[in-house]
Image (spheres, rainbow, N blue to C red):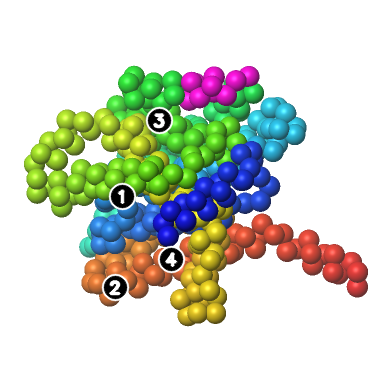
Amino acid sequence: MATTTFAMAQKLNETAPTALTKTRDVRLDFFRGLAMFIILIAHVPGNWLTLWIPARFGFSDATEIFVFCSGMASALAFGRVFREQGNLMGTVRISYRVWQIYWAHICLFFAIATAMVTLNMLFPDGRDYVGQLNLYPFFKDPQNNLLGLLTLTYVPNYFDILPMYMVILIMLPFVVLLAGINRWLAAAAVVAVWLSASVLDFNFPAEPWSERQWFFNPFGWQLIFFTGFALSAGWISPPRVDPRLFAAAILAVLATVPFAYFRVFNEFTWFLEWRKEWSFLINKTDFGILRYVHFLSVAYVAWILAGHRGARLQAQNPNSIFGSVWQKALTLILKVGQQSLAVFIASMFLARLMGALLDQVGRTHFSMLWVNLLGGLLIICVAYTASWYKSQPWKSRSKTHAKT
């Protein structure tokens, strides 16, 4: 049975196009949607569900999923412009996206900072929400720090993913240009930049009054972004479906657990000592190499299980109870994945409010359940709202009125 499944999957993989296709792969939106829910859960202060997210059992986490899938989505969104209109127009398209993300980052900062100040005023005897995010330095010297915020020389830890994403997008036209000359040249450049982060500690300063650097070093994280981009753009072929490789990937994932799960490495000092001695291999800031290996192993297993272009994700019988529920859940997850930027921004804001709500109602199993469920429903609403706005409904209504 297993051999037959692998044989069928291998046949599908061999007939799949290696170049970028026009249709969107269900797996991309599915896994990016899952990452959005995990990121929301992970950013809620004092949320017990964080004990059960994938990051607790392996070196890589939802951030890798988000960045890798963003690379794949970028190949879909921008690759055609580079191919059909050239590098100049492709660069212009990238610059427009960077402009959007930049202002999203600035607005997110002020929205969260305002919310934290408001919470401190509403609950003066409760938790210090401004202090939780270490925002007092900004308010102590707003004149200089406002300039630092706008120039990205002041990047508080909670607000560092979007700046990292912007820098990687700025790198994209250069990598595409190199790939046009020779794809191995582009690969060598990507690896060289990653080494500059890992070996030379090449990074950006995060604040002018200390030596702290960006928590997410874009020169390290671009490695996984361009891996996703290269796969989606057809620069590299996906790995063949092989039961031996599948078994090796599962073993790699399982072997990581005792080095990543805190209950194990805190109990057995050998694992803890290994983490301390070899921390640069799993360093999150510079994207340590074992994080990359772990993610690729997880991604390969997920790629096999999901089936060609996500066929197994959609294979449930819609007439059965489970199949009907799964199809509805799948639709919601895909919608969240399709609107990942809007959902990510909303989740970063909502996570702080969910933490404050838990502070007020208490952290019981029941409250944790309904608060997380509420947050999940809210980001689903954000996804559908963003999709509705992107459909530009006013245009269709204008046409209807014009006909009448």
Which residue lies under the disc numbered 1? 55
**Mark 1 surroundings within 10 Å by alpha-carbon count, few (fewer than 14), some (14 through 19), many (20 or more):** some
Query: Nearer the observer, disc 1 or disc 2?
Result: 1
Left/right placement of residue 397 relative to residue 4 reads right
Cβ–Cβ below 8 Å for labels 4 and 3?
no
Q: CA distance from mark 2 to mark 4?
A: 14 Å
x 32%, y 53%: residue: 54
Q: CA distance from mark 1 to mark 2?
A: 23 Å
Which residue lies under the disc numbered 3? 220
Point out the stretch of residues depicted in magenta.
181-190
The secondary structure that most of the magenta stretch takes on is: helix
Q: Secondary structure at mark 2?
A: helix
**Mark 2 surroundings within 10 Å by alpha-carbon count, few (fewer than 14), some (14 through 19), many (20 or more):** some
Q: Secondary structure at mark 1?
A: helix
Queried whether the magenta region covers residue 159, the answer comes back as no
Queried whether the magenta region covers residue 189, the answer comes back as yes
Query: Nearer the observer, disc 2 or disc 4?
Result: 4
Which residue lies under the disc numbered 4? 376
Viewer-proximal residue among 18 and 186: 18
Which residue lies under the disc numbered 2? 367
Q: CA distance from mark 1 to mark 3?
A: 19 Å
Viewer-proximal residue among 384 and 14: 14
x 10%, y 39%: residue: 270
Q: Quadrant of the N terminus?
A: bottom left
Amino acid bearing label 2 = Ser
Q: CA distance from mark 4 to mark 1?
A: 19 Å
Q: CA distance from mark 4 to mark 3?
A: 30 Å
Amino acid bearing label 3 = Gly
Query: Nearer the observer, disc 2 or disc 3?
Result: 3
Give residue 135's quadrant in the image: top left
